[in-house]
Image: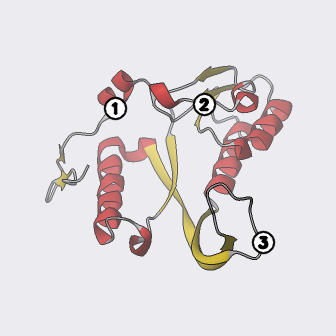
Amino acid sequence: LIQVKFFTAEIKAKFASRGELAHQAQQAYHRALVQIYGDNLQIIKGYYSERQECAMTFNEGHPPSKTDRTTVWKLEEKQTDVRMALEMYRDAIRGEAEQLVLCTNDSDMIPPIEMIKADRPELKIGIVVPREQDTSRVISSLASLGDWSLPYVSYEALRLALLPDKVPTRRKPILKPNHW
């Protein structure tokens, strides 16, 4: 293992059900990951954009109506997918790995994987679908591009991957949030 690249975006507290607690929990999680994995981990962040948008109102048993609209908040993750695609392609082209393992079920990753396969056919690509065992629905066109794939992450693998409740640091330990 050369490095794990973790692509994410910071939670916007005003949209999270737990508000600022959610943001603080995410920050603690990121600090704990860095503390445990050090240089083997790189956290690469996109961001969320927010805007008000008019959307068609859902009415059970009725077809969509373009005239029955409501204003909603549209929260959209930005640059995370593009950063993932570019980092993956860059690592492949630089020859920095014998294998890339992508943990996603996002069809937006199909074009960069196809490009990597065309430009570096000898490079092995694995696809891990980040879903629980009983809820898995793999995008078959994505999984078929990999040299291997895991259609779900088992409960046992999830249990074994949990961080400890307390991560020691040189100062104050990082504590697992109570609501986790």
Q: Which residue is mark 2?
A: 137
Q: Which residue is mark 1?
A: 161
Answer yes or no: do the residues labelled 3 and 2 have beta carbons within 8 Å? no
Nearest-to-viewer mark from 1 and 2: 2
The quarter of the picture where residue 91 lies is top right
Q: How many marks?
A: 3
Amino acid type at circle 1 is Ala
Disc 3 versus disc 1: distance between alpha carbons?
A: 47 Å
> In the displayed structure, does residue 151 sit left or right of residue 82?
left
Helix or strand or loop: what does disc 1 sit on?
helix
Q: Residue at x 18, y 43 (%)?
A: 165
Q: Is residue 3 left or right of residue 122?
A: left
Task: From the top left corner, tell me how far across and down residue 110 is, in percent.
Answer: 76, 39
Spot occupied by residue 109 in the image (x, y as percentages of width and height)? 71, 43
Q: Amino acid at mark 2?
A: Arg
- Height in image: 78 above or below 110? below
Which of disc 2 and disc 3 is earlier in sequence? 3
The kind of residue on which mark 3 rests is Lys
Residue 108: image location, x then y, percent: 72, 46
**Residue at 37% of width from left, 25% of height from top?**
155
Contact between labelled residues 1 and 3, with CB atoms less than 8 Å apart = no
Q: Nearer the viewer, residue 133 or 56?
A: 56
Residue at point 13%, 59% (across, down)? 172
Residues packed near mark 2 inside 10 Å, few (<14), some (14 to 19) or many (20 plus): few
Dividing the picture into quadrants, the one containing residue 158 is top left
State the SS at label 3. loop
Q: Closer to the N terminus: mark 1 or mark 2?
A: 2
Residue that numbered label 3 is attached to:
66
